[in-house]
């Protein structure tokens, strides 16, 4: 499976890769994944195994392919080589188990709709074609809004929301998908400190209830505090595993290359500077 | 104006223009929300060669063959735009411009050729350029009503899917919907909305009918459902007004009249719509400047 053993992360404490079985240890398995736009590889031969019930960060410099990795797992981009398994099965058979939080900036927030309506979209997959959302969907959406402390905003037009509120609406929308694997693209992007705390708590609660959460994350300062696992990515997978084992200076240097010098001084002098 | 209730021809014209206004208003809302305003332009121009070819092939100027010809050509145009964007480095707007001008050029060429045929004068194909509502017959209106009705029923059925496509297509595909199929379906409906208006409004200006009502309606509301209904209303209003203005005067083409009516609605909406209107914006900022002291303003 791994063509490049030297580059492979620490084997899990359960031993070498478990073959696919019904009650699967691994929430996500990415094998030999290569994605290219035109001739340029965005991801090159990436292997990643995500244990069930972890809260994982995907970090790496701009253009490292973090978003592409998430989208490849979700089947949103064409894969040149490799494959992805969710709970040991192809994604197409596991759609209902996977929830997605896209980047906040990926939609037009001036769209004429309400907060509650956006959250209800998370139930559309369950509803299927043509059927309209009803009382049950409304109730599920209201409960999810309550979890992200946005109940008061249910009937607001979405363009009236702040960045942090938009992010919480997207989180609520993923919660109503009632999945057990959550893929999130920069859930902390552009939110204030209070909202960030609230979101972290929510993600940790999700993990503690048995779900698997994988986030594209930008702020290296908070990785150890927020996440129990981490994948370091820069087109190739540099390292992946428990944060304590993998989030080392050596691996960070390998991931960020020349820019490490700046990162190091930044972390020593000014914490949380960007 | 009172002729509307007594004059059979005027009633036919108003009915046809009203229905096509409703249909283009409904579909136009989605076009506006998806930032695809240019698509309507490309489809309507691309339809011209289809109309002329349909006439040359069938020798008939019945509405249905011509509409089918227009629809096929318009649809091929959108497919070509997609193919160009996917397979070359030309961006969407460039591809739209290319398809628009090439198809329209071919259409004009075919039109000139067809005029040389003895039966061309009866066919009156040149009315498809700028539209001639006065030429609408009962048969045309029935065709418009049936096709438009089907389009609106499909929108009602796939409301949820079209909303998903317009707001967050990637999320839709994660949910398991085949968004490509939904996109093709919606685009097909836009093609229908455009081709049923070509005889009345003309290929040159029909695209305004799928942009203006939606853009105006967006000013007045923050709900998709309300927006689509308002847009239908505005579309009908501009369609009927334009058609009547042109059929009362001697040989005024309908397209420009319809577009003028639609533009008036857009202008009024841009200025006076509550919340988003420019006038209210100005008033509000003045009131804030007068009433609020600087500290309060900073707190906003």
Image (cartoon, coloured by chain):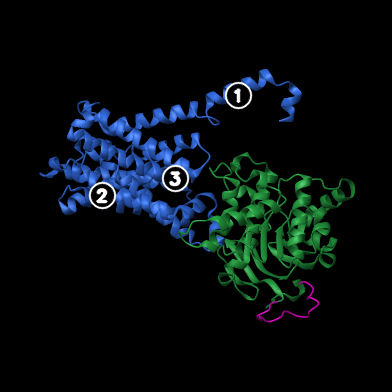
Tag 3 secondary structure = helix
**For the residues marked 3 and 1, what is the alpha-carbon distance in whole angstroms?**
31 Å
Question: Which class describes the residues within 10 Å of circle 3: few (<14), some (14-19), or many (20+)?
Answer: many
Instruction: Report if the CB atoms under discs 3 and 1 are less than 8 Å apart.
Output: no
Chain A: drawing colour: green
Q: Which residue is mark 1?
A: B284
Mark positioned earlier in the residue sequence (1 or 2): 2
Q: Position of residue B118 (x, y in %)?
A: 10, 44
If you read the primary sequence from the N terminus, does the residue marked by circle 3 or circle 2 appear first?
Answer: 3
Q: Is residue B83 visible?
A: no
Let me know if residue B67 is in the magenta part.
no
- The magenta span reads A9-24
Rendered residue at 40%/44% (across/down) = B26
Is B241 on the left or on the right of A238, as rendered? Answer: left
Question: In the orientation shown, which residue stands out farthest toward the left?
Answer: B118
Query: What letter labels the chain drawn in blue?
Result: B
Q: Position of residue B146 (x, y in %)?
A: 28, 50
Residue at figure coordinates x 58%, y 21% from the top left: B283
């Amino acid at each position: 499976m791994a063509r490049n053993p030297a580059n492979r992360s620490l084997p899990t404490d359960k031993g070498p890769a478990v073959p696919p079985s019904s009650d699967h240890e691994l929430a996500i398995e990415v094998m030999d994944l290569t994605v290219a736009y035109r001739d340029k590889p965005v991801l090159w031969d990436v292997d990643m195994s995500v244990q069930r019930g972890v809260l994982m960060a995907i970090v790496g410099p701009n253009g490292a392919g973090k978003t592409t990795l998430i989208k490849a797992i979700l089947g949103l981009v064409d894969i040149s080589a490799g494959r992805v398994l969710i709970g040991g099965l192809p994604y197409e058979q596991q759609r209902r188990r996977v929830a997605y939080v896209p980047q906040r900036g990926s939609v037009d927030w001036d769209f004429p709709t309400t907060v509650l309506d956006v959250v209800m979209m998370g139930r559309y997959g369950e509803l299927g074609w043509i059927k309209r959302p009803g009382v049950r969907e409304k109730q599920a959406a209201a409960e999810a809004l309550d979890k992200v402390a946005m109940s008061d905003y249910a009937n607001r037009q979405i363009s009236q929301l702040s960045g942090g509120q938009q992010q919480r609406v997207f989180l609520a929308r993923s919660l109503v998908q009632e999945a057990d694997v959550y893929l999130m693209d920069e859930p902390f992007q552009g939110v204030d400190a209070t909202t960030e705390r609230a979101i972290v708590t929510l993600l940790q609660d999700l993990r503690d209830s048995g779900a698997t959460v994988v986030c594209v994350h930008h702020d290296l300062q908070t990785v150890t505090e927020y996440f129990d696992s981490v994948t370091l990515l820069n087109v190739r997978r540099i390292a992946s595993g428990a944060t304590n084992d993998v989030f080392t200076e050596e691996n960070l240097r390998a991931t960020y290359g020349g820019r490490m010098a700046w990162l190091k001084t930044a972390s020593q002098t000014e914490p949380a500077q960007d | 104006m009172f002729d509307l209730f007594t004059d059979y021809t005027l009633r036919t014209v108003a009915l046809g223009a009203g229905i096509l206004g409703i249909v283009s208003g409904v579909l136009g809302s989605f076009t506006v929300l998806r930032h695809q305003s240019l698509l309507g332009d490309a489809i309507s121009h691309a339809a011209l060669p289809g109309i002329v070819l349909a006439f040359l092939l069938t020798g008939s100027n019945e509405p249905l063959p011509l509409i089918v010809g227009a629809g096929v050509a318009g649809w091929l145009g959108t497919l070509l735009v997609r193919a160009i964007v996917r397979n070359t480095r030309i961006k969407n707007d460039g591809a739209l411009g290319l398809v628009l001008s090439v198809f329209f050029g071919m259409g004009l060429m075919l039109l000139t050729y067809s005029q040389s045929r003895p039966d061309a004068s009866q066919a009156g194909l040149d009315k498809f350029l700028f539209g001639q509502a006065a030429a609408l017959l009962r048969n045309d209106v029935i065709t418009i009503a049936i096709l438009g009705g089907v389009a609106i029923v499909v929108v009602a059925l796939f409301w949820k899917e079209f909303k998903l496509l317009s707001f967050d297509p990637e999320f839709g595909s994660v949910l398991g919907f085949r968004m490509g199929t939904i996109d093709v379906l919606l685009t097909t409906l836009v093609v229908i909305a455009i081709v049923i208006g070509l005889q009345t409004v003309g290929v040159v200006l029909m695209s305004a009918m799928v942009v203006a009502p939606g853009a105006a309606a967006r000013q007045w509301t923050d709900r998709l459902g309300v927006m689509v209904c308002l847009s239908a209303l505005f579309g009908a209003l501009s369609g009927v007004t334009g058609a009547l203005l042109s059929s009362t005067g001697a040989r005024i083409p309908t397209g420009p009249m319809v577009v003028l009516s639609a533009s008036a609605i857009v202008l009024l909406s841009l200025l006076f719509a509550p919340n988003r209107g420019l006038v209210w914006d100005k008033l509000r900022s003045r009131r804030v400047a007068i009433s609020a002291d600087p500290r309060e303003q900073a707190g906003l």
